[in-house]
Image: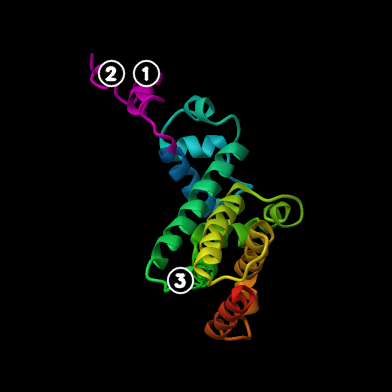
Amino acid sequence: MDVKRHSRPGAAPSALADARSRPTSARVAGDELLDAARRCVLAVGVRRTTLAEIARTAQVSRMTVYRRFPDVRSVLAALMTREFSGLLQRVNETGDQAAHARDRIVHLAAASVGALSADPLFRTLLDVDAELVLPYIVERLGATQHFAEQVLRSLLEEGHRDGSVRLAEVAAQARSVLLVVQSFAFSLRPATADVDEAALLAEFRHLVEAGLKP
C-alpha cells in the first residue's frame, strides 16, 4: 500500500510513512551513528550535542540510538575513541621507512602532535568544550591514551632489542613519552602564537630523540 498516494492533500506525513523513511536499527551500523555524532559535535560542540540531535542527523529514531548507546556520554566516548585511535593508527603506519625503532618513535610522536592539533574534532573539543579534556589530564587516562601507550610500548621494546633506544623500564618510558606528546598536542596552538611552529616541533623531536638515545 502506497501511504503517500492515499494521504489527503496537505495532510502531514503519517507516523507510518515517517517510520518507513527511516532506516531500522538492524540496518544502521554503529559507525553511521558515530558519523552523525561527529557532525553534531563539529556543529555545536560536545555539551550541546544530544541523543535526539544525533538521531535526527542520522535520520533514525531515538530508540535506534538508545538500543546501541545508553546515553549521549557513551556515544561521545565511542566517537572520541574511534576518531583519535584511528588517527594515531594512521600516523603510526606512515613510519615504516624509519631506520630503526627510535626514529619511528620520534616520527610517530611529532606526526601525532601535528595531526591531533590539526584535527577538526580535536580542535572543536579544545575550543568549545576544553573543560571536558581536564579529567584526562589530572584524573585518569582515557582509552585513546591507553591505545597510544600500547603502541609506544611495542616500539620501545623493539628499540631495546635493536639497540636504538636507551634501556629503561618500558612502562615508565612509554608513559613519559605519552605525557610529552599530549602536552604539546593540547598546547601547540597557543604555544605557536609567538613562536614558529616548525621550529617548536623541531625542538620537540630533539627532546624525544635525546630522551631515548642510548
Q: What separation in Å lies between label 3 and label 1 (alpha carbons)?
A: 61 Å
Q: Is residue 182 left or right of residue 62?
A: right
Residue 126 is situated, as x and y percent measured from the top left of the image, at 62, 61
**Measuring 57% from the left and 77% from the top, which residue is drawn there?**
209
What amino acid is labelled 2 in the image?
Val
Q: Does 92 appear in magenta?
A: no
Secondary element under disc 1, as helix, strand or loop, is helix
Q: Which residues are magenta?
A: 1-30
Residue 154 is situated, as x and y percent measured from the top left of the image, at 53, 56
Sooner in the amino-acid sequence: mark 3 or mark 2: 2
Answer whether labels 1 and 2 touch (C-beta < 8 Å).
yes
Q: What separation in Å lies between label 3 and label 2 (alpha carbons)?
A: 65 Å
Image quarter (top left, top right, bottom left or bottom right) of the C terminus: bottom right
The residue that disc 2 covers is 3
Q: Nearer the viewer, residue 131 or 173?
A: 173
Q: What separation in Å lies between label 1 and label 2 (alpha carbons)?
A: 8 Å
**Measuring 52% from the left and 54% from the top, which residue is drawn there?**
84
Q: Is residue 42 left or right of residue 135?
A: left
**Measuring 61% from the left and 71% from the top, which residue is drawn there?**
166
Q: Nearer the viewer, residue 90 or 42?
A: 90
Q: Single out the mark in the foreground, 3 or 1.
A: 3
Q: Which mark is residue 102?
A: none
Residue 59 is situated, as x and y percent measured from the top left of the image, at 41, 35
The image shows residue 106, relative to residue 29, as above or below, that is below
The image shows residue 148, relative to residue 199, as above or below, that is above
Q: Main secondary structure of the magenta part?
A: loop
Q: Which mark is residue 16?
A: 1
